[in-house]
Structure formats: structure tokens, C-alpha cells
Amino acid sequence: MNQELLEYKLKGYCCSQIITHWGLKQMGKENPDMVQASAGLCFGMNQGKNCGILSAGMCILHLADPEAADLENCRDFYDWFEEAFGSIECDDLLEGNPLNKVEKCPMMIEASMTKLAELLEWDY
């Protein structure tokens, strides 16, 4: 786990909050209310549904470049995510093992940050 990701985890951020905070920071923005609101996406909207990493990533794509998000970036991110991790559903990704929040999710967050930076042509 990289240092930046560790710092977010130590602040108590969940996956979607980490992606949101990181994306805002990449854009030179701060929005604590948006970071707090993105907690509603954590753990598949707290229902094990769509992964918060994916959902927050879609929000960042639309915030950073709405036109490209509509044209291709969101589709590309979604397709990449599903192919890379085998599902978009939090319950499937965690495989019924709560320890995967510690073991698997950080790797997925880091890989998603890299993919988002690639799609948005950010240095990361």
C-alpha cells in the first residue's frame, strides 16, 4: 500500500472517500462535503452492491472532464474495472471474507487511481 493510500485509511476513509479525496486533490480542489457524501457509496452503498471504488471513480471522471466522461472515459473505466477484478459488485469482490477489505480493496483502489489518472491524463 502506498503512503498516500495509508494516510487516507488512517483518517478513517472508506474506498469511495479515498477515490473522491484523491481525485479532488489531483484537480487542485478541496470539498470536504463531497468526500463526506461519498461515504454513502462505501461497501456497495452499504448493501454489497456496486463497488464504491467504481462509483466514486465515475463521479471523479464526470467532475474532471464531463464531455470525455460521457463519450468514452466512463465506459472505459467500467469495462476495465469489471475485467480487472471480475465483478463490479462489492459482495462478489469481497468473496464473503471481511478481511478482503484490508487485503484486496487497497490493491483495487491503487489500481483504480492509476487507471483514472491514465484516462484523465494526470501525472500519478
Image: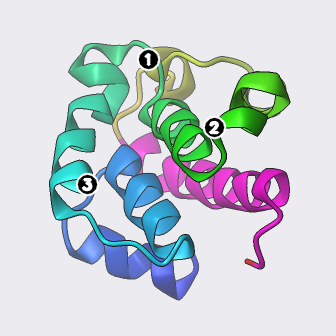
Q: Residue furthest bottom?
A: 3
Magenta stretch, overall SS: helix
Q: Which tag is nearer the camera, tag 1 or tag 2?
A: 2
Q: Viewer-proximal residue, 45 or 35? A: 35
Residue designated by label 1: 91
The vertical placement of 37 against 33, above or below, is above
Span highlighted in magenta in the image: 99-123
Kind of element beneath mark 3: helix
Residue where numbered disc 3 is placed: 35
Are the residues tagged 1 and 3 within 8 Å (C-beta)? no
Counting from the top left corner in percent of width and height, residue 94 is at: 48, 29
Report the front residue among 67 and 102. 67
CA gap between label 1 and label 3 equals 23 Å
SS at badge 2: helix
Q: Position of residue 99 (x, y in %)?
A: 38, 44
Measuring 62% from the left and 48% from the top, which residue is drawn there? 108
Measure the C-alpha gap from mark 1 to mark 2.
29 Å
Q: Which residue is mark 2?
A: 66
In the image, which is nearer the foreground, mark 3 or mark 2?
Answer: 2
Q: Is residue 76 left or right of residue 7?
A: right
